[in-house]
Amino acid sequence: MRFENLEKELKNRNINLSYQRLKILEYLAHNQCHPTVDQIFINIQKSITTLSKTTVYNTLKKLVEEGLVRVINIEDNETRYDIVTEDHGHFKCENCKTIFDFNVNLDSFSINGLDNFRILDKNIYFKGICPECAQVNEKN
Amino acid sequence: MRFENLEKELKNRNINLSYQRLKILEYLAHNQCHPTVDQIFINIQKSITTLSKTTVYNTLKKLVEEGLVRVINIEDNETRYDIVTEDHGHFKCENCKTIFDFNVNLDSFSINGLDNFRILDKNIYFKGICPECAQVNEKN
DNA sequence: ATACAAACTTGTAATGATTACAAATTAGGT
DNA sequence: ACCTAATTTGTAATCATTACAAGTTTGTAT
Ligand SMILES: [Mn+2]
Ligand SMILES: [Mn+2]
Ligand SMILES: [Zn+2]
Ligand SMILES: [Zn+2]
């Protein structure tokens, strides 16, 4: 597991250490459910009562810039954050809103129309109904 | 080409015809550049001076619900709309901001971890530098 | 340990996209 | 032509995000 030492990870990326930054990174490492800014803010505020939402925004911006965290834009009204930066896909259940990870080899499939394009970032996401919600629906 | 008769297309989907709706659909058909709400609004306002932005939002919502138009969420602060609803990928140039289409067979590649998920919608987008911008950069 | 500048955090205000809502207008059916 | 339902419009409200300035903390040099 990456992030056995989050402090070191920050220093490696020339991000100065601060208590807030460490707590935010810890939260992301322990809650890999693709949280929103609000979820992160509300939870960490429990232990850092003076925390400002601006700090959460600032820190996330920095973590994204340095490649420690990736942004997930599925809905237009909620940005989510993922500490897993390796290529993988996301499935959002339209019923329970959970976001699931799935494995996909983005290099394996054929693409037409991108010759000479320099690809820096690949994203794939699906929407639908997760198995649990599908099962509940059947019973109705 | 689909949409040789946009009026008929609307009726087929039980969307009542209105001058505004037709103009918005026409705009999307003739400007397949994935426009934002603002672009649509500003351009159509030239011919319908009384147009309200709320109408643009309402209409787009309806067109999306009825499957005539698809939403594109790449950046978190700008929703774009695409009249091409067939599966295809999008590439956004981080320099000139243009969004390019590319062909991709979303069924062809292997996915692990989505057994028993009902997939209703597939999205794929890349970011990077388009050939034109890459060439300009080289010269510097 | 002290001092100082740079970096970070905080709170508040501003911005910008989207939605809510009610009144005015228009469309479709009789 | 008339009536009802659907649509459009303008304004206000909402909500996420950013801007900004003041206060606090950190890192470094003395
Ligand atoms: Mn993920
Ligand atoms: Mn497209
Ligand atoms: Zn579900
Ligand atoms: Zn470009």
Image: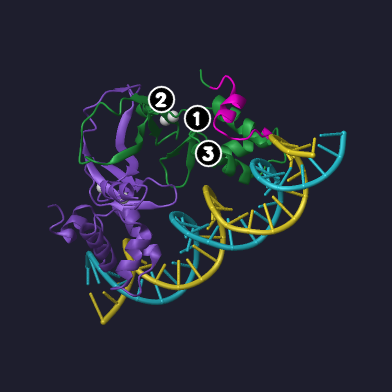
Chain colours: A green, B purple, C cyan, D yellow
Label 1 element class: loop
Q: Chain of mark 3?
A: A
Q: Chain of mark 1?
A: A
User: Which residue is depicted at the point 67% across and 34% down?
Assistant: A18
Mark 2 and ligand 3: say if the CB distance to the nearest ligand atom is below 8 Å: yes
Q: How far apart, in angstroms, are the residues tagged by discs 2 and 1?
A: 25 Å
Marks 3 and 1 sit apart, C-alpha to C-alpha, by 12 Å
Residue linked to disc 2: A132
Q: Badge 1: few (under 14), some or many (20 or more) residues near its Cα, within 10 Å?
A: many
Left or right side of A22 for A140: left
Amino acid residing under circle 3: Thr
In x, y percent, where is residue A126? 34, 34
The residue carrying mark 1 is A83
Mark 2–mark 3 distance (CA, rounded to whole Å): 23 Å
Residue placed under numbered mark 3 in the picture: A36
The residue range painted magenta reads: A3-19
Q: Secondary structure at mark 3?
A: loop
Residue A52 on image: x %, y %: 66, 44
